[in-house]
Amino acid sequence: MAHLDFYRSLAVPSDRRILFMVLDGLGGLPHVHTGETELEAAKTPNLDRLAARGELGLSTPILPGVTPGSGPAHIGLFGYDPVEHQVGRGVLAALGVGADLRPGDVAARINFCSLNAEGQVTDRRAGRIGDEIGAPLAERLDAMPDPAGVEMRVRHVKQYRACVILRGAGLEGDIADTDPLVTGVPPLAPVAQSEGSERAAALVADFVTRAADALDDQGAANGVLLRGFDGYSPLPTMGELYGLTAAAVAAYPMYLGVARLAGMAAHPVKDEPDAMVEQVKSLDGADFVFLHYKSTDSKGEDGDFDAKVAEVEKADGVIGRLVEDFDVVMVTGDHSTPSRMSAHSWHPVPLLIAGPDARSQNHPGFGERECVGGSLGHVSASDVLPLVLAHAGRLRKFGA
Amino acid sequence: MAHLDFYRSLAVPSDRRILFMVLDGLGGLPHVHTGETELEAAKTPNLDRLAARGELGLSTPILPGVTPGSGPAHIGLFGYDPVEHQVGRGVLAALGVGADLRPGDVAARINFCSLNAEGQVTDRRAGRIGDEIGAPLAERLDAMPDPAGVEMRVRHVKQYRACVILRGAGLEGDIADTDPLVTGVPPLAPVAQSEGSERAAALVADFVTRAADALDDQGAANGVLLRGFDGYSPLPTMGELYGLTAAAVAAYPMYLGVARLAGMAAHPVKDEPDAMVEQVKSLDGADFVFLHYKSTDSKGEDGDFDAKVAEVEKADGVIGRLVEDFDVVMVTGDHSTPSRMSAHSWHPVPLLIAGPDARSQNHPGFGERECVGGSLGHVSASDVLPLVLAHAGRLRKFGA
């Protein structure tokens, strides 16, 4: 927190608007035949123009060699130390659906699942039921009577996914997942991993039993698996730290969750370029807009080089339609997802910052190798936000 | 301090002499028409020769995105953590004029100012009185009787500027400035910002009243404004840490002050190339000479690109006349002052180290973009001194 307090002490207002665009899983690896990465192969006229007048560099998401999930990767990009501030997926899921979450609440993700007569898991995703089934089931669990002195709220997330929030005195979230990760075995018990979590673990065990009763008449979705338990302790927001009026535009709840954690107003959007552009353009009251573009990561995870190239090109079109609305434009990924690996990786991520005070180098384009020689150098993801704030004139001089 | 103790444990003597040359505000931004920075545009045959045989890199003064004042920027270059060691301007001013300063003393800057009959400030700089008026007025304040148990010394700095030092048991320097920063209002009260500072604040309030009485017969300079209060806590010196016999050559007291803080012998000099060269050449007993060149920053702050170029060229001439007297030559800035911004900035600063053990890359010259690809990489300002010590053979092997 020492760094945050230091930067907070320097924060000043500014009229410059910031676009903070994250292309999920942006970084890649050279194609074995062409030697070009996805970003290098993509035709990106808008990013190329920004690269020519802006500054390039590489961002290390967590620490050298560490492959991040999207949660900690975004927490880093938003300027927090992602190792110090580890936030459970349950909390991010609850924040992602806009649930009322208060300090001390314990949250977990829920999967509806299929159980056989012996109580063994036969499908960890209940046949991938859709929203039309999942949503009313979540409401049914939410309507179950609360145990004495505790509130338990259930919120639907998407399809077979939901989340549960426990509120009451003396609850802690250090509880093992009940999802066995394989089929043919019963769900695991929610074992407390610390003494302070025993009360919450007992409440969860009771909840799992009552949920199975409440879902008894359901075919596929007759049980629940819980994971990602965590207690909620709020972070200082971007408003508190830097005086930013920050907004987030994202199609997936998890990213809205981590944005809410940073104090951004969350704006869900269809996963589609026109909708994204329209939504961002409607936010003229925000001086900081985080725009999350998911499909670059999805195609990388699919191992589909060409499809990832196509998504980078689509994202380039989105950027081109937004550039004129902002004074400072930052483009990076939360991590690399090389299609050659079909997975997230630890490789540093291309980083671009364009604004009126950029020390431009006339880069011919935006790509991994061009970024190696960029004037931003190799930075930690948590340095990206301070650099962007500097370009926006939002950090005053330190000392005289 | 952990880093300092570690480096201290490795320090060994060496015959190699070090020139540590700081061109204030050296870093710049590309000219909008030519695309060249001030340093890139300047004709610098001596720096070019050093760049060819030396190593280049970029130095981040404080932390990414942070624009420093010259005080903390120099503290960083001298190897200390500038966020951990925040030193008030009052202490630097007192050190700058060579005042006797002891641990626990509280120091502040003084401006002589003009007050009207209502006690309102009409000129915060007393009509910019010269040394011939300011010096005797400072002596007059110094001669006022001390309060019981406390010594209060006043030292002239330059023109309308002076400083005051309070010495006594139980004094702390967490006191608000009395300078209102505008005219037409009375000076502010010296409000204690912490309980421990209340005694010193009361002494200062009394001092301000007595000073106005003592200056009553003065026309323009009939009052004082105080700012930059701080208690003095000495840093471990370069002598203690590394066994260096270090000397500083600078035209402005502030830079001599921060050099004294690091334990250097301070040598004031005329702000003029010949005088600087002569002064440095006279210091053959020093194995480390810090030479401060101010005008690069001043012209940058003026927003005068061509004048900053001319100052870089003048500084290049100074370096050319000194190179043969030193084994290791380091050239950098304390921060960037792009003339395009007419202000200090956060941009990393060009860095050059030349010596017998340089991993040279035959760089064609010394400039921001050349430095991006330099073998020193992007370093923190507080890493510059250890690198220089290494080039001078002053750090022994760590472990066997």
Image: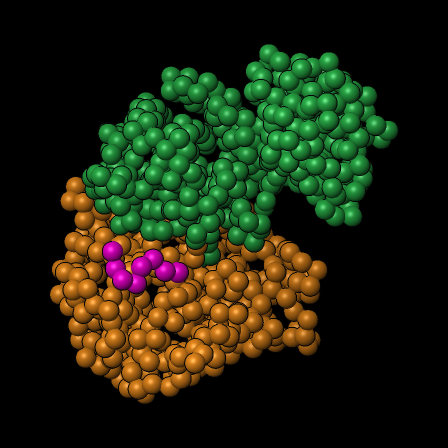
Chain colours: A green, B orange
**A128 in relation to A361, above or below:** above
Report which quarter residue A37 is drawn in.
top left
Residue B377 locus on image (x, y percent): 31, 59
Q: Residue furthest right?
A: A148
Q: Is residue A133 left or right of residue A281?
A: right
Taking the magenta stretch, the answer to whether it contains residue A221 is no
The residue positioned 65% from the left and 69% from the top of the image is B171
Please identify the quarter of the rendering in which residue A391 is found: top left
Residue A279, visible in the rendered structure: no
Count of labels shown?
0
Please determine whether, in this image, residue B224 is positioned above or below residue A48: below
Residue B348 in the image, given as x and y percentages of width and height: 33, 54
In this view, the residue in front, B335 or A18, is: A18
Q: Toward the viewer: B23 or A368? A: A368
The spot of residue A279 in percent (x, y) is 44, 19
Image location of residue A50, percent across then percent down: 28, 35
Seen at 59% across and 72% down, the residue is B105
Asked whether, in this view, residue B267 is left or right of residue A382, the answer is left
The residue sitting at 51% across, 22% down in the picture is A267
Q: Is residue B37 left or right of residue A69?
A: left
Quarter holding the C terminus of chain A?
bottom left
| Span shown in magenta | B373-380
Looking at the image, which is closer to me, A76 or A164? A164
Residue A372 visible (yes or no)? yes
Q: Residue at x 65, y 23 (%)?
A: A114
